[in-house]
Amino acid sequence: MQVAVGSMLYLWPRDHMEEFYRRVAESRADIVYLGESVCEKRCLSTFEDYYRWAMVLREAGKQVVLSTLTLLESSFALKDVERYCLNGDFLVEANDMAAVQILVEHKLPFVIGSAINCYNAHSLEKLRKLGAVRWVMPVELSRHWLEQIKSEQSNLGFPSIETEVLSYGYLPLAHSGRCFTTRYLNRAKDKCQLVCQQYPEGIKVRSQEGQEIFNLNGIQTQSGTVYNLHSDRASMAGLVDICRLSAHSNQCLDWIEAFKSGASPSQPPESQCNGYWHNIAGMDYRSRDSANGDYRSWE
């Protein structure tokens, strides 16, 4: 399986991003997604910056994909999406149907982002005919659901396209017109002054019992613990073409090698989850017992 690095979901200073993508270029990642996909107000890194990093990464042998915004809230955002779609050099990940429309109108191939609600073989076939060459499975779907889609494709005689699954990182669960970071700081969203850069890994939200249930990232709500399918790689064989890593720190890039080689950095079970893949509560975690192949639950 190939390993992809998803677009950066947090607001980092340009020099931090520069260092991050330098490390990605030196890594064993096969595919790299670039671009602002969360909030249209985030402008510390520009389209020109992403394009420059894209060229460097391509020279390093990576396949580069430019990612579009997931939630469009203005005509300015739509123009920005159009600029990414019509970049002229790189494949585009469409995270909203507006991006799909632009790409289809210009007869350009594209990747279906996980935020696009694509849950069955008929939807996939429709998008494939429009130009989709890969789809990123919605994060809440399970291995069993993916098996059913693959089976449905085969039974209906639909051609298969590349399947990518988020395999490491905080799960992007929802996007909102409200900014939770500014609300947390009692500020107006229109006068945010990009305060989310003060929280480069998001804001942890805990229950009254102290359980980490969410991670807030501006207008994006994420899972409270890191989604990690490293121990599930064997069950992905034959179903998944690409494992996506969504980094929240430079140290997360160590997991690229982990997914490539099989060796795993140490991570306590209570700090991660993989429930969706197993068709159980998303925040739960099941660990494979290497001795007998059984799963142990950390629910």
Image (spheres, rainbow, N blue to C red):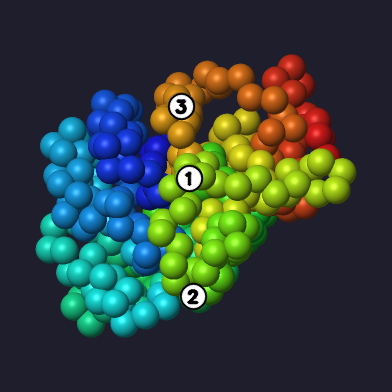
Q: Is residue 26 above or below residue 82?
A: above
For the residues labelled 2 and 1, the Cα–Cα distance comes to 39 Å
Identify the residue at horizontal 49%, vertical 69% (top origin). Answer: 189
Q: Amino acid at mark 3?
A: Gln
Helix, strand or loop status at disc 3: helix
Question: Are there few (<14), some (14-19), or many (20+) residues within 10 Å of tag 2?
Answer: few
Does residue 297 show up? yes
Q: Hey, which quadrant is residue 106 in on the image?
A: bottom left
In the displayed structure image, the side of residue 20 where residue 86 appears, left or right: left
Which disc, if any, is residue 123?
2
Pinpoint residue 11: horizontal percent, then vertical percent: 41, 49
Q: Are marks 3 and 2 in contact (CB under 8 Å)?
A: no
Residue designated by label 1: 198
Q: Residues under labels 1 and 3: Cα distance?
A: 19 Å
| Element type at mark 2 | helix
Q: Earlier in the sequence, mark 2 or mark 1?
A: 2
**Location of residue 139 by image quarter:** bottom right
**Secondary structure under the numbered disc 1 in the rendered image:** helix
| Quadrant of the image occupied by residue 132 | bottom left
| Residue farthest toward the right in the current orientation of the protein | 209
Foreground: 255 or 9?
A: 9
Quadrant location of the N terminus in the rendered image: top left
Q: Which residue is mark 3?
A: 251
Decide which of 213, 278 is in the foreground and name it. Answer: 213
> Do we see residue 243 in this rendering?
no
